[in-house]
Image (tube, rainbow, N blue to C red):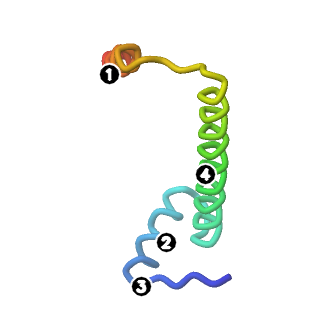
């Protein structure tokens, strides 16, 4: 697979790679692998949530609202 960047994007990637102590190719590859890993984790969580819902393990709107408010405070 080939990925093409504009000269400005290449310059930016080179700067970031230099600061990270790596080369631009490794930087892009690592970022792509993190994206894939995050996508896999997200899809697994969605499957888990659907399975829980299918089992009737649901929480009501008020519980969700309180949980979100608690997360904002912490």
Closer to the eye: label 4 or 3: 4
Q: How many marks?
A: 4
Cα–Cα gap, marks 4 and 1: 24 Å
Crowd rating for badge 4 (residues with CA inside 10 Å; few <14, some 14–19, many 20+)? few
Location of residue 9 by image quarter: bottom left
| Residue in the picture at 67% in, 32% down | 51
Closer to the eye: label 3 or 2: 3
Residue identified by numbered label 3: 6
Q: Say whether residue 37 is left or right of residue 13.
A: right
Residue 29 in the image: x percent, y percent? 64, 66
**Above or below for 6 versus 62:** below
- Upstream in the sequence, badge 4 or badge 3? 3
Assign a secondary structure to mark 1: helix
**Above or below for 14 versus 70:** below
- Upstream in the sequence, badge 2 or badge 4? 2
Crowd rating for badge 2 (residues with CA inside 10 Å; few <14, some 14–19, many 20+)? some
Q: Say whether residue 72 is left or right of residue 9.
A: left
Of residue 41 and residue 59, the one placed in the foreground of this image is 59
Crowd rating for badge 3 (residues with CA inside 10 Å; few <14, some 14–19, many 20+)? few
Q: Say whether residue 73 is left or right of residue 59.
A: left
Residue 53 in the image: x percent, y percent? 59, 28
Closer to the eye: label 2 or 4: 4
Name the quadrant of the C terminus.
Answer: top left
Q: Which mark is residue 14?
A: 2
Closer to the eye: label 1 or 2: 1
Cα–Cα gap, marks 4 and 3: 26 Å
- Upstream in the sequence, badge 1 or badge 2? 2
Cα–Cα gap, marks 1 and 2: 36 Å
Residue identified by numbered label 1: 72
Residue 37 in the image: x percent, y percent? 66, 50
Residue identified by numbered label 4: 39
Location of residue 15 by image quarter: bottom left
């Amino acid at each position: 697979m080939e990925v093409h960047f504009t000269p400005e994007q290449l310059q930016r990637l080179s700067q970031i790679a230099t600061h990270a102590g790596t080369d631009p190719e490794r930087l892009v590859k690592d970022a792509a692998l993190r994206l894939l890993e995050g996508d896999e984790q997200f899809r697994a969580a969605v499957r888990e949530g659907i399975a829980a819902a299918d089992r009737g393990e649901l929480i009501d709107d008020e519980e969700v609202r309180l949980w979100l408010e608690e997360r904002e405070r912490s």
